[in-house]
Amino acid sequence: MPLLTWRDNYRDSYLDATLLQEGRGRFSGRCSHCSSIDPKYRCRTCHGYRMLCHKCMLKKHEDEPLHIIEVISLCKIGMRYQLGHRRGGLSLAIPGHADFVVIASNGIHLIKINFSNQLLEIGWWPSTPIEPQTVATTDLLRITNPPTDFYLALEQMTDGYGLQKLPDRLSQWMLMLREWRHIKMVKRAGRGFDMAGIKATKQGELAIPCRACPQPGINLPTGWETSPGDIIWLYALILAEDANFKIKGRQRSNDEADPPLGPGWATFVNNEEYENHLARFVTQEEISHCVTFSALSKANSKGWKGLRATGIGSVSCARHEMFRPNGTGNLQKGERYVNMDFIFLSSIVATSLLMITISYDIACQWSKNFMTRMKDMPANLKMPSHVQIQYRVPKFHLPAHTEKCHAPYSFNFTRWVGRTDGEGVERNWSSLNGTARCVAVMRPGGRQDTLDDFCNFGNWRKTVGLGDALLRKLTWQSRKQLSIIGHSNIYREST
């Protein structure tokens, strides 16, 4: 075995090499650059771990301010990073803050710096545009998750012994990461090319749409709306709605103290409009359930004290499992009609399709009086009367309902839905639930921005995987069809 070979023959040499690396190495006598006597410094980031004298160390790191010098820092041996001018030329830069901190992938660095306005140009994201004291490298911002744990890991990486008193920049780090994620989302949506600027972003515009769902003017033929009834189902939208009580939010602040950076611009509803509508129905109870769902309903209602959001409700496309634009919102008191109605109607407000199928695990109750309740909705959310809508219960959930629900709400007895199971929104929770521990303690704006980012990430992964997903389904269906043909031939031969 390789492990036993290593243990018996090479383990001691590995230990010797490790000790050599942590000691002065083979360069203890002279500086590896100028050969001066008794070099005192070694860079842990540079290749080779060579010992250098004071002069050579400063010279070698003129353009490498984020390298880590053992025992001492570049800052303490006199390094001052000059930013924004040619070496040896005139400089318009001014000294940065005395405690200027750079958060990078190899640790947390306290450096001395002269600069003017070039931080973003070299990939350093400032925590504030005015007299910044903390920056994070954009390379680091691309890879961090979860952010708090990652920052603590950087502290351990910088000083695993706990002997140094590192500057506390956790709050600035969280702020920069949130700004970075927002700017990347805005950039990917093409907002940088609009002369009206970011503020002109429309509702739901930053959400990554499902390319496979019908979208008039994009992937539907001209005149689709006048298609005969026997093929109009080709342009129908099949959605799934559900509530998730793991994605909670504690009562820590309010939207005024911590507003979302993109209110209603991505997968979440516009909170201001949403909460103004909810304020009219404060006393409304949860949606009633079938008898077999009563225990689950009671379980979901436990532990609500101290929570601003008891969970989230969300709508996704049932076949491709992508979060809908403006199709997610906070729940304040379980699964109420007013919440789920608003979230569903918000998710379809931008569509002009004629036929919609909605899957919901309690559709048997939610569908009752839906059209009547819609009259109390804001005018922009009211669904046109010519839209056909049918309500179904997901296949896995349906057997738990009372028998009278089985046939009317079964996908198996529904035309024009293929093999859709309606459980797609449940599968979305499996990936989103990983954020529950982090987002629960965030303030409301940061929580929404983070969930928007994760929902969009899930949508993008599924977008690039649509081709492979279609191939898998076609392959499975082909094999199934061949199996059916084979069994049919055997049956005919036997009779």
Image (spheres, rainbow, N blue to C red):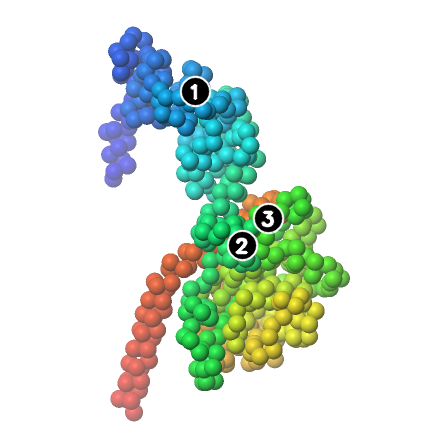
Q: Is residue 109 left or right of residue 249?
A: left
| Neighbourhood count class around disc 2 (C-alpha, 10 Å): few under 14, some 14–19, many 20 upward | some
Q: Residue furthest right?
A: 283
Q: Amino acid at mark 2?
A: Thr
* C-alpha span from label 2 to label 1: 42 Å
Please determine whether, in this image, residue 6 is positioned above or below residue 332.
above
Q: Secondary structure at mark 1?
A: strand
Q: What residue appears at the point 63 percent right and 64 percent down from the top-left corner? A: 342
Relative to residue 490, is residue 336 depicted above or below?
above
Q: Mark 2–mark 3 contact, CB under 8 Å?
A: no
Circles 2 and 1 in contact, beta carbons < 8 Å? no
Contact flag, marks 1 and 3 (Cβ < 8 Å): no
First of labels 1, 3 by sequence position: 1
Residue 262 locus on image (x, y percent) = 56, 51
Q: For mark 2, what is the residue?
A: 201
Q: Which residue is mark 3?
A: 260
Residue 391's spot in the image, x, y percent? 57, 75
Residue 141 location, x and y as percent? 45, 40
Is residue 94 toward the left or the right of residue 369 in the image? Answer: left
Where residue 8 sits, quadrant-wise, is top left
Q: What amino acid is found at the position of numbered circle 3 in the picture?
A: Pro
Three-letter code, disc 1: Arg
Residue in the image at 43% along x and 42% along y: 142
Disc 1: which residue? 80
Quadrant of the rendering where the C terminus is positioned:
bottom left
Q: Residue at x 24, y 34 (%)?
A: 5
Q: Quadrant of residue 14?
A: top left
SS under mark 3: loop
Q: Foreground mark, 2 or 3?
A: 2
Q: Nearer the viewer, residue 350 or 495?
A: 350
Q: Quadrant of the N terminus?
A: top left
